[in-house]
Image: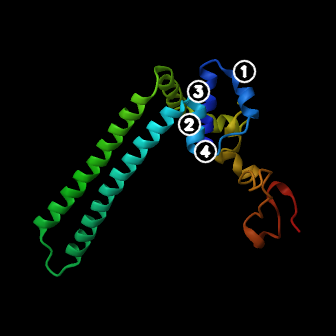
């Protein structure tokens, strides 16, 4: 979720929409992925239905292929554990599994092309911007950790050592964590002493 938010922020900044960012940051974020997708891309209800149908069909296809892969893997395991495994049969099973994995990759590509076909050019352009921004996310974390930029990277893994794991379940700051457990005399992160 944090990665998606970082990508959205970067995309908005690159598109010169910084004033919109300030407005959107105060608005409540959609809770379900479909709602988030609809908001991010400004999808119509018809587009949401089409994308949902495509996604469900792809999920069904992938599940069917994965079931076949698991069956072949079980046959492979049984064959390998047998007293006298047949190398030709083992090779056939491996090739069948590889073919099924290639079908999954092809199905993912077909789904993506079909899903993009549902979108307008403006929506596809926005996806391209977000995809380009994602390439910069690994660079943003360390910059934010050292206070060189503001953004969602302020809780990057480099900074967690100082500030703890992040917000608690109720949205507030997480309680301080004992350093190394009870063997450190209850010393808390940040130099605070625990009770």
Query: Could you say where residue 99 lies in the image, as x and y percent from the top left?
Result: 22, 51
| Image position, residue 176 (x, y; %) | 80, 58
Q: In this view, does 117 lie above or below 160?
A: above
- Mark 4 closeness class: few <14, some 14–19, many ≥20 residues within 10 Å: few
Q: How far apart, in angstroms, are the residues tagged by discs 4 and 3?
A: 15 Å
Q: In the figure, 172 relative to 118: above or below?
A: below
Q: How crowded is mark 3: few (under 14 residues within 10 Å), some or many (20 or more)?
A: many
Judging depth in this view, the residue of 128 and 81 nearest the camera is 128
Q: What element carries label 3?
A: helix
Circle 2 packing at 10 Å, graded few (<14), some (14-19), many (20+), is few
Report the side of 37 relative to 100 (left or right).
right
The residue singled out by tag 3 in the image is: 11
Q: Do the residues labelled 1 and 4 touch (CB within 8 Å)?
A: no
Q: Do the residues labelled 3 and 2 touch (CB within 8 Å)?
A: no
Q: Mark 4 points at which residue?
A: 1
Q: Which of 49 and 137 is in front in this view?
A: 49
Which residue corresponds to mark 2? 37
Q: Earlier in the sequence, mark 3 or mark 1?
A: 3
How far is the residue under mark 2 from the one under mark 4? 12 Å
Select label 3 or label 2 by which is in front. 2
Distance between the Cα atoms at labels 1 and 4? 22 Å
Name the residue carrying label 1: 19
Q: Which residue is pictured at 64% across the width and 38% down the height?
A: 142
Question: Looking at the figure, which quarter contains the C terminus?
Answer: bottom right
Q: Is residue 81 left or right of residue 40?
A: left
- Of residues 17 and 14, which is closer to you in this image? 17
How far from the left and from the top, in percent, is residue 70? Answer: 31, 64
């Amino acid at each position: 979720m944090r990665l998606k938010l970082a990508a959205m922020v970067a995309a908005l900044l690159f598109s010169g929409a910084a004033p919109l960012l300030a407005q959107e940051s105060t608005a409540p974020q959609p809770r379900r992925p479909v709602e988030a997708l609809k908001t991010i891309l400004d999808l119509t209800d018809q587009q949401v239905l089409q994308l949902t149908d495509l996604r469900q069909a792809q999920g069904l296809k992938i599940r069917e292929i994965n079931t076949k892969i698991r069956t072949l893997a079980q046959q492979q395991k049984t064959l390998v554990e047998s007293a006298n495994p047949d190398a030709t049969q083992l090779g056939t099973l491996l090739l069948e599994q590889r073919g099924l994995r290639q079908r999954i990759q092809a199905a993912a590509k077909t789904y993506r092309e079909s899903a993009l076909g549902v979108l307008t050019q403006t929506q596809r352009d926005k996806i391209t911007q977000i995809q380009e921004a994602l390439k910069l996310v690994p660079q943003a974390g360390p910059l934010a950790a050292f206070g060189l930029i503001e953004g969602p990277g302020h809780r990057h893994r480099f900074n967690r050592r100082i500030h703890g794991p992040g917000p608690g379940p109720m949205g507030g700051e997480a309680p301080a964590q004992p350093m190394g457990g009870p063997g450190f005399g209850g010393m808390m992160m940040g130099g605070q002493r625990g009770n």
